[in-house]
Image (spheres, rainbow, N blue to C red):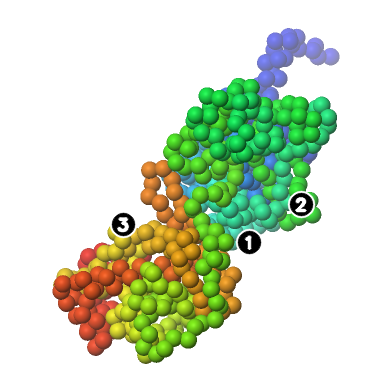
Amino acid sequence: MLATPPYTDKMSNHLVQAFAEQIRARYSIDSLNMSVSDWCARNTTLRNKPFSIKGYEFQRQILDDMHPNLWCEKISQVGLSELQIRKMLAFLERNQGTTGIFSLPDQPVRDRFAKTRVKPLVDGDEVFNKERDKNATRSALLYQLGQSFLHLSDCTEGSATSTSADILLHDEIDLSDQSMLALFGSRLQHSSWKVRQFFSTPTHVSFGIDAGFASTDQNEYLCRCAACGHWQLPDFTRQFVIMPGLPDEIACFSEIEEHHTHEIDIGGAFVHCEKCFRPLDLSDPELREWVPTYPSRTLARGYRVRPFSTSQLSISYIIQELLTYKRLSFIRGWWNTVMGRAFTGGNERLAVADIEACLDSPQMPDLPEGEPISVGIDSGIMCHVTLFKGADPLNSPIFSMEVVHSERLVEHITMLAKRYRIVTGGMDRHPQTVLANQVLAASGGKIWPIEYRGSQELHPIKDPTGENTIYFQCDRTALLDKVQTRVRGHNLKMAGFGIQKQVIINHLTNMVRDEKPKEPARWCKLSEDDHYFHSIGFGITSSVIAEYISNSSNSDVRQVVSLIGVNAQKINNLLNTKNTIANGPLG
């Protein structure tokens, strides 16, 4: 009989430790019933400590939720980007042979995220560096985890169409190209998983994350009062916040100004129960619960993260951020990033009431033959044509708004030129440059191609000889500002729109004026349906073209009108030469 080896406790502990290290090198800590949040806590680290959601317990359900169509509307700086990348890595690691795409708005953001968030996590945790990973393919934007792959992507067409996937996670979608986001969906066609989730701070109402969240079951993080048991949704409003010294005339906290802070006892402010008015304990996860507003909506899952979803954001911090954004004259930034709300105030978007105040009769009035008119055209497969009564569209009413197929546009303009006297007009030069030149010819040199380029209100572009004006450039923001000014002032009467009333309202509300500190203002479209906004804008801006032509001391305009009247192809050749020699090819 062999004697039992005289192992000591020290030797036994050493062997157990070595065995455990071998196990960790080969396997992650996992089980069939382990949630994603538990897996991340057991297998990943953050700042050299086990990953934890302490203080941000609202994250647990979001992290565990693998709904195939999830939308999370959030405030900034509450760890959700960190949460997302862990969810993605956990999915890929636990479901070998799968592929995930994690998208960010643009290349600089993507590269920064890859360097500061993804690489330290993947390189630093043993669960992603097993024996099988010794020869794994890894780069700044591609990580192999066994037989699974993670792709980090920006929102470009190449990225959206080049790789198939099982799971798509999109971060900050409101800052991403919306058309490119739509393309990403095709990457899931051959997957049996088809998981797609969107996260973002909001920007504008009915756009991006705000529009997506509106279609979901809309989970809100409620809080139960420990004193009376009442469930409620605490928010940064007078209904829930006691702020000693706050003047009674301030109905909304966004009205607080710098001088008010001398009167307010910010340190004494607290969140209270709306029923019994006792303080709420926002930090106890036993008193918090996600509850869907519309539980019957099962096709899309939604979460809204508010300032009081966590106890980590104090009332003092919220007010300090409010005053900071006010000093920057960027109150929308506070609503979006600190409050997690789409912004509805300010002058950034035309109001439906202002548009309706401008809408006159849907019937087109009878105008005598030879009546002077001005024209604005937004081109596409279907062209939106706006007709102004009179020679000065800047101060004239609209008497007709209609949609004409691009193949019939030249014929339609020729008919208008015979029936009325076209005095001036404008049409977008892109994407159909040849069509714009044909319209210029058909209108007798009155409806000019206009290109969105530069920062000037209007700038004539000459042919290579420097003698003939062949089109105009203008600042896009300035052009669209004119439409906003006239509509908001109820100074633009619109008639002859037929059954298109709602179409016009949609087009004029689907644009927002995006204003950020130290950046030029720009108009952004919330959807593709914005054509009449541009059509009206081209028409109004053509009044400046008419003024330029009337004040021109040379014959350049008359020469080009004569030229296109003889042969429209010649002006096309001039334009093509101008593009190549002067500006380079235009997209």
Q: In which quarter of the image is residue 315?
A: top right
3D distance between C-alphas at marks 1 and 3? 43 Å
Q: In which quarter of the image is residue 34?
A: top right
Viewer-side residue, 359 vs 326: 359
Q: How many marks?
A: 3
Residue type at numbered disc 1? Gln
Q: What residue is at 55 percent from the left and 38 percent from the top? A: 255
Q: Quadrant of the C terminus?
A: bottom left
Q: Within 10 angstroms of label 1, few (less than 14), some, or many (20 or more) residues?
A: few
SS of the residue under disc 2: loop
Residue type at numbered disc 2? Tyr
Q: Within 10 angstroms of label 2, few (less than 14), some, or many (20 or more) residues?
A: some
Q: Does residue 115 show up?
A: no
Q: Does residue 106 show up?
A: yes
3D distance between C-alphas at marks 3 and 2? 47 Å
Q: What residue is at 39 percent from the left and 58 percent from the top? A: 477
| N-terminal-most mark, 3 or 2 | 2
Residue type at numbered disc 3? Ser
Q: Within 10 angstroms of label 3, few (less than 14), some, or many (20 or more) residues?
A: some
| N-terminal-most mark, 1 or 2 | 1
- Report which residue position mark 3 lands on: 455
Q: Nearer the viewer, mark 1 or mark 2?
A: 2
- Report which residue position mark 2 lands on: 294
Height in image: 531 above or below 175? Answer: below
